[in-house]
Image: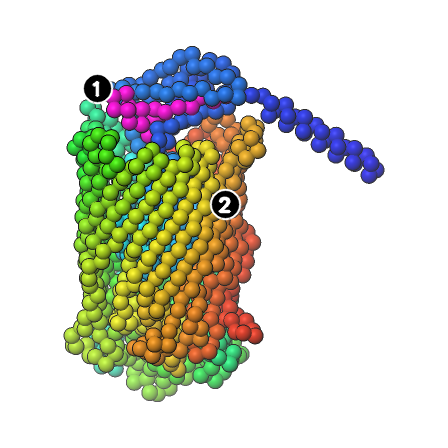
């Protein structure tokens, strides 16, 4: 029997080998070349090149090049078209087996109105191939991920998208780390214009607020250039929104999602109305007028009217439904004659998500005894609503204008339960925090380009963004766990049971103008000059109030009975067993204001010494003034704000050398100086904690700017269209970096300090290949397979001297004075494999398997001999199926977090590791159906 099986295997193997040889031996050829303007010789991007009578079509890349393969030997007719140009037909183009026929085509500009727009005169910046072609010609070290790849990998928001870029990692979809550097060392722009954050604790806007449905591409620039704002060292993240299409379309999409530990299970929420479910608060959580009209509210001061808080203390229990989403997107491009065009795109989308997780939360002292140890449960209902409009007008061949408007509303309702032990309390406690947060962004942008001649181009932009953030009536209850299913109110402090209100409003105005001047003639090595001016002004107002409860009531109850006791009819002195009262002690640091003014000019020189070596040298002069208006805890309501100002003129040089080895290989060397400013919240002495008995954070108004010195060396190889091999070496030195440090205090308290210095170095590797080209095969099956890999190794070290410790405004005692930077994973790995099968010329299916892992990274630095807290490595595996039917119907399935690993944080000591936090996210299954009209 064994010999028969062996024989069968041998015969099968031989048959497959012979079949493969037969298939591979069938030669095919290809047509390749460049499409140019007949008059100027300039290459044309996104021209359409088609083999007549077949489904073979290609668009030219950023260099005007195209390639059409898989053609049997013979003679063909090729048709080339480009908007505002006369179409061209070339007959009898001969293709030979295993050979490339070079066909360069020059098009003439049409003086007549085109009846139909065949293809838009712009690069397809959603395509992976076009983005790679653009990158190949760039003198910046930049990486981009386009809408095409975002869809293929099943990524639903920008946060998920940037995490697939080499050297980039996310902490909780909120904090982005680029090359080991966190929030304050990075920038976020929208279509090149700066954008503020909806989160008062972050410099960068939470990237998960942007759905990928509004995104054309996401770029991360890792080397500095003077036309960029100087406040970054890790990366500058630019979110480019979708714009007008090549031809008219309208698409409707529906989506739904399932989570293995949430859907169909018990779930707590306070999202009761239709508007709440849609992500908007109707005002029912607003601070009552009787409270808002006071400086410091006391319910005993008013017998009538009662305060009338609308939010209940106890949430509603439901069975968690599936998550849902809906989207509408459409646009068109119109030819108006005489080279004029008008295009538009609109996008409207909504989605919600329900998530549950349970786990452990703890922190330990120097003796490895817990300060607290809780079992935790979190119920989160989130929504995202977005609306995008883009208008484009081309006024002939020399001028174009664009207007973009974007509105995003993001809401979350969290029920966070903690049950367990706290060292300064006797017995176990149970705490519940019910929070609702609504953040919104409204931005409008105008941009224009004027080509006054072949040598002079002018670009200008204007932008305004308004950010609002609201936390209305966050409630917290704290109870004594009687261990028999009943609870009693914890009355140690009035703050144990409270209502909290916070509002943030931020306005951001920005503008820029730049000119590009090409040199005259070919003798000078100076090929072009760029200069410009930029301005930005943003202002923030943050207000918060915490109304606490003094509870005299002494009942025992179940958790769903809290509203039976903490109701207006039981208001009184709070000193007897039948009443409670609301009380508020004004705390001056709860309110602060801040503003930032930036005025900058920049100059870039582009030298080409020969056809291989380029030097781009430039400098930026950036004046900034940052003011933080705050009050200390000892001040009263009527006390004037104190002002902390950080201002000065920074001169920020940058130089890049680019050596083109051949048409497939580049080497880049870049060096620069940049700065890092304190975030508004880091410089404001405002305190905030994330849960009952959990550490608080407080700003430090004595912070100063950090100076960053950066160097990069990169080698790139582009084997063929859509393929890449790249390796980068980078190093950074940061003078006076800003870091979070624990304060010596009875309760855990963290603040920000300028430490001495930090060093960071690493290597990045990228590899994208078509599997058919790896094996040199023309097999359709192998040609339809591709793999991608990027990995990073990062070394980081920060030094805190004894002098810095002695001079700190607040007493600090770091356990380790030399340690890695916060959030700097020593390694990051992304891998994906894709297979595309074409069922017909109009239908196809793409399968993608994606894997990600990040190395152990510092989460909290220990103090007073308590251990540092690290987030442990997490393996993530996703599988996505994208199907297109008849060019009209899209049906996608996604299977996320298939390994469902433990998300684990541990506090490390020399002889022991203790769990600080641990939970699971569950496996996600999603389906998306869309139809294009």
Query: Quadrant where the C terminus lies?
Result: top left
The percent position of residue 8, horizontal first and vertical second, equals: 77, 32
Q: Which residue is mark 2?
A: 789
Q: Is residue 849 left or right of residue 722?
A: right
Reply above or below: 700 against 82.
Answer: below
Q: Which residues are magenta?
A: 29-48
In this orientation, which residue lies closer to the viewer: 239 or 467?
239
- Please tell me whether mark 1 or mark 2 is closer to you in this view: 2
Q: Is residue 2 left or right of residue 744?
A: right
Determine the residue positioned at 22% across, 30% down: 521
The percent position of residue 98, horizontal first and vertical second, equals: 53, 21
Determine the residue positioned at 32% across, 59% down: 708
Determine the residue positioned at 72% across, 31% down: 12
Q: Is residue 748 left or right of residue 644?
A: right
Q: Which residue is mark 1?
A: 111
Mark 1 or 2, nearer chain start: 1
Q: Is residue 102 left or right of residue 845?
A: left
Alpha carbons under labels 1 and 2: distance apart: 47 Å
In this orientation, which residue lies closer to the viewer: 226 or 825?
226
């Amino acid at each position: 029997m064994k010999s028969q099986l062996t024989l069968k295997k041998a015969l099968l193997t031989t048959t497959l080998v012979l079949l493969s040889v037969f298939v591979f031996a069938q030669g095919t050829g290809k047509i390749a070349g460049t499409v140019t303007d007949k008059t100027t010789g300039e290459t044309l991007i996104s021209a359409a090149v088609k083999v007549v009578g077949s489904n073979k079509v290609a668009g030219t890349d950023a260099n005007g090049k195209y390639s059409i393969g898989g053609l049997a030997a013979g003679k063909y007719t090729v048709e080339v078209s480009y908007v505002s140009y006369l179409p061209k037909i070339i007959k009898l183009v001969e293709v030979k087996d295993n050979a490339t026929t070079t066909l360069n085509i020059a098009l003439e500009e049409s003086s007549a109105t085109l009846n139909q727009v065949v293809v838009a005169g712009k690069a397809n910046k959603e395509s992976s191939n076009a983005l790679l072609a653009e990158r190949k010609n760039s003198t910046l070290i930049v990486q981009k991920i386009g809408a095409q790849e975002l869809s293929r990998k099943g990524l639903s928001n920008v946060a998920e998208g940037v995490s697939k870029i080499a050297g980039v990692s996310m902490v909780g979809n909120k904090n982005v780390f680029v090359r080991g550097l966190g929030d304050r060392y990075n920038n976020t722009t929208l279509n090149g214009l700066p954008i503020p954050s909806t989160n008062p604790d972050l410099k960068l806007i939470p990237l998960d607020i942007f759905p990928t449905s509004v995104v054309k591409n996401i770029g991360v620039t890792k080397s500095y250039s003077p036309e960029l704002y100087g406040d970054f060292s890790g990366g500058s993240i630019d979110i480019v929104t979708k714009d007008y299409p090549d031809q008219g379309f309208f698409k409707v999409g529906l989506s739904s999602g399932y989570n293995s530990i949430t859907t169909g299970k018990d779930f707590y929420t306070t999202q009761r109305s239709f508007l709440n479910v849609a992500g908007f608060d109707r005002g029912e959580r607003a601070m009552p007028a009787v409270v808002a009209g006071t400086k410091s509210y006391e319910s005993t001061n008013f017998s009538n009217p009662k305060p009338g808080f609308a939010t209940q203390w106890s949430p509603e229990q439901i069975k968690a439904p599936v998550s849902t989403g809906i989207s509408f997107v459409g646009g068109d491009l119109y030819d108006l004659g005489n080279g004029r065009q008008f295009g538009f795109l609109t996008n409207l989308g909504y989605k919600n998500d329900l998530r549950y997780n349970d786990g452990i939360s703890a922190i330990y002292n120097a003796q490895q005894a817990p300060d607290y140890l809780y079992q935790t449960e979190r119920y989160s209902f989130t929504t995202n609503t977005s609306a995008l409009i883009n208008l484009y007008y081309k006024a002939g061949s020399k001028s174009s204008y664009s207007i973009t408007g974007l509105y995003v509303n993001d809401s979350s309702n969290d029920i966070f339960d903690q049950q367990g032990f706290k060292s300064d309390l006797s017995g176990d406690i149970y705490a519940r925090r019910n929070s609702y947060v609504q953040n919104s962004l409204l931005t409008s942008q105008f941009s224009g380009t004027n080509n006054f001649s072949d040598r002079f181009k002018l670009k200008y932009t204007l932008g305004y963004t308004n950010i609002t953030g609201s936390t209305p009536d966050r409630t917290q209850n704290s109870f004594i766990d009687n261990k028999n299913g009943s609870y009693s109110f914890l009355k140690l402090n009035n703050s144990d049971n409270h209502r909290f209100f916070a509002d943030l409003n931020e306005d951001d105005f920005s503008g820029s103008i730049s000119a590009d001047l090409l040199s005259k003639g070919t003798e000078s090595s100076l090929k072009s000059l760029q200069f410009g001016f930029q301005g930005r002004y943003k202002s923030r107002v943050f207000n918060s109030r915490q109304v606490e409860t003094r509870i005299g009531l002494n009942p025992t109850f179940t958790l769903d009975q809290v509203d039976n006791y903490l109701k207006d009819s039981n208001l009184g002195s709070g000193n007897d067993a039948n009443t409670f009262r609301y009380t508020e002690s004004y705390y001056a640091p709860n309110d602060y204001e801040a503003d930032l003014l930036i005025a900058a000019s920049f100059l870039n020189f582009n030298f080409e010494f020969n056809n291989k070596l380029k030097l781009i040298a430039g400098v930026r002069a950036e004046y900034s003034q940052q003011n933080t208006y705050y009050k200390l805890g000892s001040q009263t309501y009527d006390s004037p704000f104190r002002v902390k100002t950080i201002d000065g003129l920074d001169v920020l040089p940058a130089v890049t050398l680019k050596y083109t080895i051949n048409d497939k290989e580049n080497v880049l060397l870049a060096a620069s100086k940049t700065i890092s400013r304190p975030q508004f919240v880091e410089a404001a002495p405002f305190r905030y904690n994330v849960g009952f008995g959990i550490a608080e954070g407080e700003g430090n108004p004595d912070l100063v700017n950090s100076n960053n010195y950066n160097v990069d060396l990169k080698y790139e190889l582009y084997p063929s269209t859509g393929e890449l091999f790249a390796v980068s070496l980078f190093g950074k030195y940061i003078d006076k970096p800003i870091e979070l440090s624990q304060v010596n205090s009875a309760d855990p308290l963290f603040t920000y300090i300028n430490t001495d210095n930090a060093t960071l170095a690493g290597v990045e590797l990228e590899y994208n290949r078509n599997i058919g080209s790896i094996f040199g095969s023309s097999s359709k099956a192998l040609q339809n397979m591709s793999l991608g890999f990027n990995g990073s190794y990062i070394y980081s070290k920060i030094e805190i001297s004894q002098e810095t410790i002695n001079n700190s405004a607040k007493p600090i005692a770091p356990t380790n004075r030399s340690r890695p930077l916060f959030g700097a994973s020593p390694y990051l790995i992304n891998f994906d494999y894709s297979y595309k099968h074409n069922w017909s010329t109009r239908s196809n299916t793409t399968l993608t398997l994606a894997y990600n892992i990040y190395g152990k990274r510092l989460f909290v630095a220990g103090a007073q001999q308590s251990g540092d807290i690290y987030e442990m490595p997490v393996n993530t595996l996703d599988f996505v199926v994208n199907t297109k039917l008849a060019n009209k119907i899209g049906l996608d399935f996604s299977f996320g977090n298939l390994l469902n690993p433990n998300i684990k944080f541990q506090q490390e000591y020399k002889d022991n590791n203790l769990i600080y936090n641990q939970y699971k996210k569950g496996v996600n299954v999603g389906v998306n159906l869309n139809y294009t009209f």
